[in-house]
Amino acid sequence: MKSNLSYSAKVKDYLCSKTAFEVGLDVTNPDLQEENKCTKCCAKSFFYGVTLFSKRLDVETMTLFIENEKLLEICTYVMIQHFLAVPDVRRKTHGRKERFEVSFKRDLIGHDLFEKLYYEENNFAFALECEDCVKYFLRGAFLASGNACDPSLDYRVEFVLKDDITAHAFKSFIDAYFHAKYTKRRADSVVYVKGREKIEDFFALIGAERFTFDVIEKSIEKQKMNEINRSCNCERANIKKTVDASVEVRQAIQKLRDTGRFYSLSDELKKTAEIRERYPDESLNSLCQLFEGEISRSGLSHRLKKLVEIANDE
């Protein structure tokens, strides 16, 4: 049965399942091995990536706004395991959409973490302790505020943010790995990466290798379709050219008959005209086979052009 999930939702579901195993929440994923588990610093980097793009801060409280229930479970697990904090979770309905509001009190999550998130929200270096932290930080950011286009339509990954300052800071950060671009979409600030190779690299970096191969496959499919279309267009153009040429020659022959000049033609031109009249839809190669003597395609083409030239010579 065909899935109703968008392409972006499929990528996020895959990453959530993978992250749940890697942080230790889900130990039953058959596609992953024990060596795929991430370190404590990487789990924290993932949490930072989520919180920096889905939070609201005030002096005493941080609130995350999360739509994906699996992502909620992961963030809650990481907070309990690595920050020793139990959040207050509330389910909210906004129109037809549901989301979770996850709140932490300052005294629960620790003054140091709160200060980093409150005062250093546009300096992402604090979230990166090892080389793999980049992967988990960007993965968390993508799950919190990212979208991926179906590669059969476009090669594009974007991050939708609520303020320009964070957007420009994030663009500067991601520019170290991919050349990103910035734009405004109504009230939102959008940082995006565009291009097949960049999207392949982005998916590989955040651990969505399955979708890297998907982009490659879609690219090959597009290339094949483009080749087929070019071939069809070329064939259509050749057919049109042949038909137009045939019509022009037949009109020239009819003009020669109407003006009484047909019988003054040379025998070879009269024979050529009669064969073309008798077989109006045949190609030049096929017409060549209908002559008693041997004639080349270029030779036949020359005769037909000569008929047109004589007809137009008033």
Image: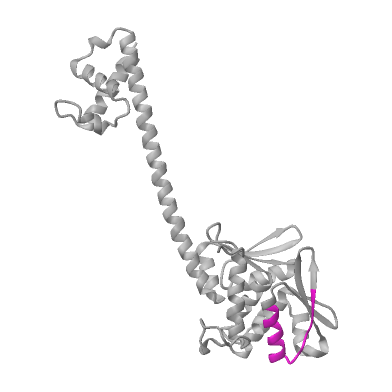
Residue pictured at 54% horizontal, 77% vertical: 207
The reply to whether residue 134 is visible in this rendering is: no
- Please give left or right for residue 244 compared with residue 296 in the image: right
Magenta stretch containing residue 78, yes or no? yes
- Determine whether, in the image, residue 58 is placed left or right of residue 221: right
Which is nearer the eye, 228 or 57? Answer: 228
Query: What percent of the width, then of the height, locates residue 220?
Result: 43, 60
The residue sitting at 52% across, 58% down in the picture is 152
Is the residue 13 above or below the residue 4 in the image?
below
Q: Residue 50, percent across and down?
A: 69, 77
Picture coordinates of residue 92 (x, y %)? 80, 72
Viewer-proximal residue among 178 and 213: 213
Residue at 61%, 88% in the rendered image: 24
The spot of residue 122 in percent (x, y) is 72, 76
User: Furthest-front residue in view?
Assistant: 1
Looking at the image, which residue sits at the far top? 260
Give the vertical position of 283 relative to 201 (above or below). Answer: above
Question: The C terminus lies in which quarter of the figure?
Answer: top left
Q: Quadrant of residue 85?
A: bottom right
| Residue furthest right in the image | 59
Report whether 141 appears left or right of 303: right
User: Nearest the camera: 20 or 64?
Assistant: 20
Q: Quadrant of the N terminus?
A: bottom right
Residue at the location (52% across, 83% down)?
Answer: 30
Question: Along the line of sight, which residue is nearer the eye, 165 or 145?
Answer: 145
Magenta residue span: 71-91
Residue 208 visible within the image: yes
Figure quadrant of residue 96: bottom right
